[in-house]
Image (cartoon, helix red, strand yellow):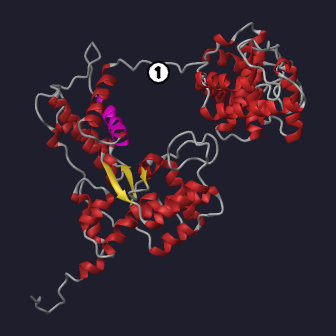
Amino acid sequence: MADVDVNRADPLEAWAEPLEAWLGDSRISKDRARRAVLAFGRLSAWMTGRGLGAEDVDEDVIDAYIELERQRSGSTVPAAAQYLPLVKRFLAARGVLVLRPPVSRARHGRPRLSGGPLDELVLDLVAWLRDQGYAPGTATSVACTAARLSNWMARQGLGARDLDDALLTRFVASQARGRRRHPSSVRRIVTVRKFLLATGLITAPLPPPPSRSPSEQLLQEWTEHLRTRRGVSQGWATEARRFAAGFLAELPVDPDGQRLWDGVDAATVNRYVTRHGEGYSLSSRRHLVSSMRGLLDWAFLTGRLDRAISAGVLRPAPAVPGLPRALSAAQVQALIAAADTSTPAGRRDRAIVVLISRLALRAGEVAALALDELNWHAGTLVVHGKGGRVLTLPIPTDVGQALVDYLRDGRPPGAVDRAVFTRLRPPLVGLSSKGISGVIAHLATEAGLGTVHAHALRHTAATAVLAAGGSLIEARALLGHARTDTTMVYARTDLAALRDLVTSWGKVPGP
């Protein structure tokens, strides 16, 4: 400690800046580092009040302060217990104190530590769980599982360097076989693994090598062609691959496992489409035919077929498409009113309904919306639509207000990604498109509207444009359709405008 100016009025002040530098060089979040520095300052002030100087610092002094904070706060793991272990490590690294082996503790509600290789990480784990938004009870359960893992590793003669997925699997198996079973170990070890990955103590295993079968390789090449050259969505490409896999499975193979295309003609494909399209909806049959045509075109372009035969694949019998199912204004208001805005979930759900009903977004587009894509100064937001299209849309006043209400008093501060709409229970990640659809379905049930899909709100926004006197071009821009004929179905929804085009019987149209 010769390089430190010991100031008895503030015994640890001289270590404040070195501590900040040490924390900055460690793999510790800025927030945790800041809280550790604050805890360090409170410890120093407490020591000053007890007449203690820098030469008095040891683990007993720090532990006495932690215990005092535990009694004062009534918390099992107060802030001092979460962040002062970092200070201990720093002081030990500087040679100020020597860390003793952790003492086994059997107090109810606290991890039982017995000198295992992970004991020092348990409190770090508790802090990490809190930062992730886990409830205190869940954090304690996960920490106890980590403590059991540490104790088990000590009995096995293992160290922190031995941590990997295989070791975690062995630990779970040992817990299942033991006389005292801990069923939570199976569930909680998954969360412990996430912490170990986040701190770099273990690394994620490499993905298994892709299948090298000729059929799988062919499907992979075609799927990449669909995504990169044709710009189809991942969902469309996945479904198309499923259709193509069924067709390829019926083709003969040569001794090397390569599919033989010599006997493929339009009649062969039509028989497959007819047989596998039974029971499908019209849209699914169209997808099947489109997939097969695309596969045949690609096979011709890559030399697998010696002639183009896709035009010979029969299309499903055309049917008069139904009118888009839109909600009335009263139904939309009932849906919005069903969200309980006194709760974070209600504020989130209300913002989702208002956003979709006003801007005609798809559920997947809402799920993909990120905080960085909200431009409050310009009053716009960026939407990533189908086919890789990027749209910049204005934020109407009511949409902006609903978003602000949610972002201020609904979105959890511990969310782990930049998604606008997130889960409200750990893990605090962004909602999926199914999650967005589930919000709409739940509110519809609460409002007594029966089954309402998120897409119905998209139709509602488009028909509202036409009802207000807007054109199909404006509706197309709002919907983000790449082709005008896709939007033409909405022309039949504005019946009042269509009636104006009909001449009454027996009258001559005027000029």
**Label 1: which secondary element:** loop
Instruction: Name the outermost residue toward the top.
Output: 157
Of residues 430 and 14, the one nearer the viewer is 14
Which residue, given by chain and number where applicable, does mark 1 sit on? 207
- Chief SS of the magenta region: helix
Identify the residue at image location x=29%, y=31%: 224
Magenta segment includes 239? yes
Tell me the quadrant of the picture where the C terminus can be found. Answer: bottom left
Measuring from the top left, give residue 437's x and y in whole percent.
49, 54
Measuring from the top left, give residue 413's x and y in whole percent.
61, 46
Does residue 133 show up?
yes
Identify the residue at image location x=16%, y=34%: 265
Residue 273, above or below 305: below
Identify the residue at image location x=47%, y=62%: 400
Identify which amino acid the numbered label 1 is placed on.
Answer: Pro
Q: Which residues are magenta?
A: 235-250
Crowd rating for badge 1 (residues with CA inside 10 Å; few <14, some 14–19, many 20+): few
Q: Quadrant of residue 225?
A: top left
Of residues 230 and 316, the one nearer the viewer is 230
Q: Quadrant of residue 193?
A: top right
Q: Quadrant of residue 190?
A: top right
How many discs mark residues in the rendered view? 1
Measuring from the top left, give residue 177's x and y in whole percent.
76, 19
Of residues 63 and 38, the one nearer the viewer is 38
Instruction: Name the outermost residue toward the bottom.
Output: 506
Magenta segment includes 129? no
Left/right placement of residue 259 relative to residue 334 reads left
Measuring from the top left, give residue 339's x and y in whole percent.
59, 64
Left/right placement of residue 40 relative to residue 415 reads right
Does residue 441 show up?
no
Tell me the quadrant of the picture where the N terminus can be found. Answer: top right
